[in-house]
Structure formats: structure tokens, C-alpha cells
Image: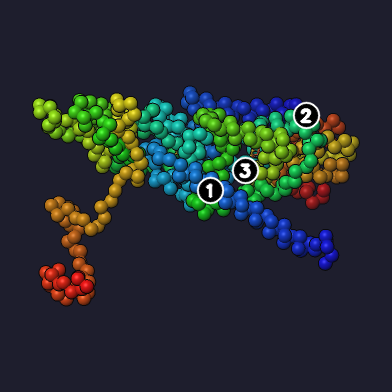
Amino acid sequence: MRYLISRRIVQVSIIVLYILAHLYGLKILEGNLSSSILFGAIPLSDPFAVLQMFVAGSIITMDIFIGALIITIFYGLLGGRMFCSWVCPVNIVTDAANYLRRKLGITAIQKRVYMSRNIRYWVLGLSLFLSFFMGLTAFELVSPISILHRGLIFGMGFGFSVVLIIFFFDLLVHENGWCGYVCPLGAFYSLVGKYSLIRVKHNVDKCTECMECKVVCPEKEVLFMVGKSSQIVNMGACTNCARCIEVCADDALNFSIRNFSKKNKE
Amino acid sequence: MQKGHMSDRRKFILTMARSVGLAGIGALIWSSVLEESVHASLLLRPPGALNEEEFLKTCIKCGLCVSACPYDTLKLAAPGDKKPMGTPFFDAREIPCYMCEDIPCVPVCPSGALSQESVSSNGELDINLAKMGVAVVDPYACIAFWGIQCDACYRACPLLDEAIVLEYERNERTGKHAFLKPVVVPDVCTGCGMCEHACITEKASITILPREVVMGRAGDHYVKGWDKQDQKRVKNARATITKTEISKKSALDSLNDETGLFE
Ligand code: SF4
Ligand code: SF4
Ligand code: SF4
Ligand code: SF4
Ligand code: SF4
């Protein structure tokens, strides 16, 4: 529970700081997840949004460039796909949908709808393709993630309908449907964070092969080594959500720092 | 090759073709949604905004301009506003731009979608240079055009007697009163919308519209012969003379020529 609670605290505090900045001018974190100013000085920008702006043909200012660079370095070097489980507000929605799904046993009664994990990379490619040809930021103009975080800070309009669509898609159509298969931002961070330092590590000696971790993991494929070999979860799709760590009763999974020098020996 | 069995190569090609096809369908649907959303409606941008096409690709939708505005003028478009999603706009009838002297909304923009240069002269911010739109009067609904005295918009305008002037005209109906008609000077008007906000008619009779929509262009063919400055445009102009069959005769003869007219 420790990690789950920390994740929720981080996710909610970020939005609360944005709201306080908008309503009362509190200068800790201003703007929104597309672009913000930290402590009134440090620019932070969503690198995927900036990439779309760039291919659309916009001139990228220094502030935006540095902001995107800071975020890219942070996730690329340190956090991996952590944005998804520690920052993104949609994660709270999809986690709720999937929790309910497990509790109601919907997966058990439902015929499996086939979807490929690669859809998200196609969507990512399409975002850039359309941005280039239409001279627009194609995903940013329809992104449910932005609709939600912007809505919470600046006013929702009919934005809740989009959030409901995602909730029911995940609940009724496909387990982890949005975040695990469709979302191009998640796909983007999977690529950016592939070689990050913070990684879950599996210890096969302690593993009793209950496979509970594979039940809770939103990206089951990344846990292919469970019960087979001791190694780090090195696929970019892992969101570092720590659900697997928390569910493991035998302490066979834990956070670790990737060790590049030792990598060959393992 | 047996039925029901496919070579890996063939499988791969088929899978690829299917994916590309699906992506194509996705692209078509997605692009039409985008097309709809960006051409949705007339809208007013914050001061200093780039032209709409540039603005759409440059604004990162951070809302920093919205937070900076002390009058809550600016809003970020949410679903249901029928505006390009997440971009800042304002509705002048509801809350106009109060033309802050320090223009807090512009320098905070990280992306350059709001350009500081466009609202500065000699390195100093000058809100009077803003061109957010232009006011247009409906002379049939504006009661000043009926002969009733109003001038609410004229007095509300921060560029009093510059962006809106009152035109005096004798009211022939009563024979002893004057019309005081508000007339907008488009070159001066910033499009702040204070006039639209102040207009006393049920639905505003003075409305701010995007400049690209309203402003015309006379083109190069018309020159103000009475204007020394405008005359300079033709000084070095060279006429292009085209010779045709008709131009061999004098103009008068050509006009009087009846050949072929009654056949
Ligand atoms: S996959 Fe997309 S929606 Fe899901 S948590 Fe990651 S960024 Fe958010
Ligand atoms: S491997 Fe563990 S940390 Fe990674 S996504 Fe799965 S449950 Fe989360
Ligand atoms: S000039 Fe002032 S009132 Fe007008 S939009 Fe900017 S901050 Fe708001
Ligand atoms: S501050 Fe600039 S980038 Fe941010 S929403 Fe306003 S116009 Fe767009
Ligand atoms: S919009 Fe109206 S109030 Fe503002 S400058 Fe133009 S005429 Fe004046």
C-alpha cells in the first residue's frame, strides 16, 4: 500500500499545486502538465507536445526547449515511464476501472477482444504524421489526458464525458485498454524511459511462482522473467508503479538501480 | 503452399498491410475531427497572438496567460466550447479585455504564441498596439442610428474618440435633433471588446470579430489620387499596353463600329 498511497499523493498534489497557482497565484507549480513553471523560474514542458509543435513547423522558444529537455532527461535517465503511474491523472481513472474490473470479475466472463500492444506506437506515429501534414499539434488538440488535467485546473466543460469514455472502455471493453494499448503519450515515455536507472528487479530465488504480480501488472509482458531468472524489468513499458512489488508476499520483486557495468554478467 | 498455412514472410506482409490500412482509416477519422475542431467558430485571442494558423501550432496550451489575467477575461477552451481545445480565448460580451498597461498575459507565454514584439514599441509594452479583433456596428440595431442618444460604447472605449468617433448628422425626421452615430476606426481599434461589453441593446449591436474576417483589401489597382503619400505608389509604375485587333482603331471609331452587330 505504501507505494500506492505515495503515487496517489504525488498525483493529487501536482494537480492541487496547479490549482492553487491558478486561483491564488501560488508560485510553486504554475501552468499545467503541457507546460509549467516550477518555483517561478524553472520551465518544464511536455516533450511529446513540443515534438508535435516542432514537426508542425512552429518555432520552438528557448523556454520551451529547455523545459522539454529537463523532462526528457528526468524520465530518460531516472524515472523511466514513471509519468504514467506517478503523475498522469488519467491513471487514477484507469486504475479505478481496472480495479473494478478485477473485483467484478469482468475479465473472467468476457471473451478476449484482441488488441495489439503496438497500437499505441502507431497512434504515436500518426500524431506526428498528422501534425506535420496539418500544421497542428494533432494529439494535443484531442488528448483526453490534457482535457482532464486542464479541466481540473481551468474548468471542465463537457470534458467529463471523455473521461467516462475511457473509464468504461477500460471497464467493459479491454483491460488496461487506454493506457496499455492506445495512449501515445504512454508509448512516448516507454521509448524515452527505456534505459532509465530506476528499475524493478526480480529475484528468482525468493519467487514461489504464485504469479500474483502478473495479475496486477498493467503491462504483464514486461514480467516475462518472473520465476525464470533474476534480472531487472528492462522493457520501457513498465511504469514503475510498484504494484508487483506490493503484491509479492515473498519479497521477490523490489526497486533497484540499473547497473550498467554488471549488466553483461547477469 | 497449403491452405491454412502461410509462410512467415507472407504473414508479415499481410500484417503490415493490415496495420497500414487501419492506420489510414484512423488518420482519416482523426484528421476530419481536427479539421472540424480548428475551423469551428470565430474567436478572439489574447493580445499579441500570432495569426490563427501560426497560433494553433505554437500555443502549448499551458494556460499561463489565463492565470495571469487579473480580470478572468481569458479562458482555455474545454470540450463544449466548440473552439480548438485547450487554446486561450475570450468572449467580449461576457468579460472584455481591460487593456492592462503592463499586459501581464503576454510576457508569461513560454511558447511565443503571444508575441511581445507585436505589442511593444521601442522595447516598451504598449497595449494600444494590440490587434485582437475589430469592432463592427450593426446600424439597424444600434439605437444611436435610430436617433436616440446612447454613446455607451463610445464612452466605454479605452481609446476614447480615437477607436470610436461620433459622427454628427441632422435628424430630418424631427428636424431639430442630431444623430450621434458611433463609427469604428479599424486602424486604431484594438478589439478589446469594452464597447461590446457596454452596449445596452439586448444583444450587442457592436461586436468584435477577428480582423482577418472583417478587413478587406483594395488591391494595387486603386490609388488615392488626392493623397500625396498614396500617389508615390504609382510614381515608378509602368503601364503595360496590350495590342489587339480592336486597338488599331481609335477608341471612338471602335465604339461606333457596327459590323457584326445586326447579323
Ligand atoms: S498511458 Fe497515457 S493516459 Fe495512461 S497513464 Fe500513461 S500518459 Fe497517462
Ligand atoms: S512490472 Fe511492476 S512496476 Fe512495472 S508496470 Fe508491472 S506492476 Fe508496475
Ligand atoms: S491585457 Fe489584461 S485584461 Fe486583457 S487579456 Fe491581458 S491580462 Fe487580461
Ligand atoms: S501562455 Fe502562450 S502557450 Fe500558454 S496557453 Fe497562453 S498563448 Fe498558449
Ligand atoms: S474594441 Fe471597442 S472599445 Fe475596444 S478599442 Fe475597439 S472600439 Fe474601442
Q: Which residue is mark 3?
A: A185
Report helix, strand or loop for mark 2: helix
Q: Which residue is mark 1?
A: B32
Q: Amino acid at mark 3?
A: Leu
Q: Are marks 3 and 2 in contact (CB under 8 Å)?
A: no
Q: Nearer the viewer, residue B151 or A111?
A: A111
Q: Residue furthest top?
A: A24
Q: Amino acid at mark 2?
A: Leu
Count of marks placed on residues:
3
Residue A125 vertical position relative to residue B162 in the rendered view, above or below: below
Residue B51 vertical position relative to residue A160 in the rendered view, above or below: below
* Mark 1 CB lies closer than 8 A to ligand 1: no
Quadrant where the C terminus of chain B is found in the figure: bottom left
Q: Position of residue B245 (x, y in %)?
A: 21, 76
* Mark 3 CB lies closer than 8 A to ligand 1: yes
Among the two numbered marks 3 and 2 on one chain, the one whose residue lies closer to the N terminus: 2
Subunit bearing disc 1: B
Q: Residue at x 68, y 59 (%)?
A: B17
Q: Residue at x 46, y 42 (%)?
A: B40
Q: Are marks 1 and 3 in contact (CB under 8 Å)?
A: no
Q: Amino acid at mark 1?
A: Ser
Nearer the observer: mark 1 or 3; the answer is 1
Q: Residue at x 49, y 32 (%)?
A: A40
Q: Residue at x 61, y 54 (%)?
A: B24
Nearer the observer: mark 3 or 2; the answer is 2
Q: Which mark is residue A104?
A: 2
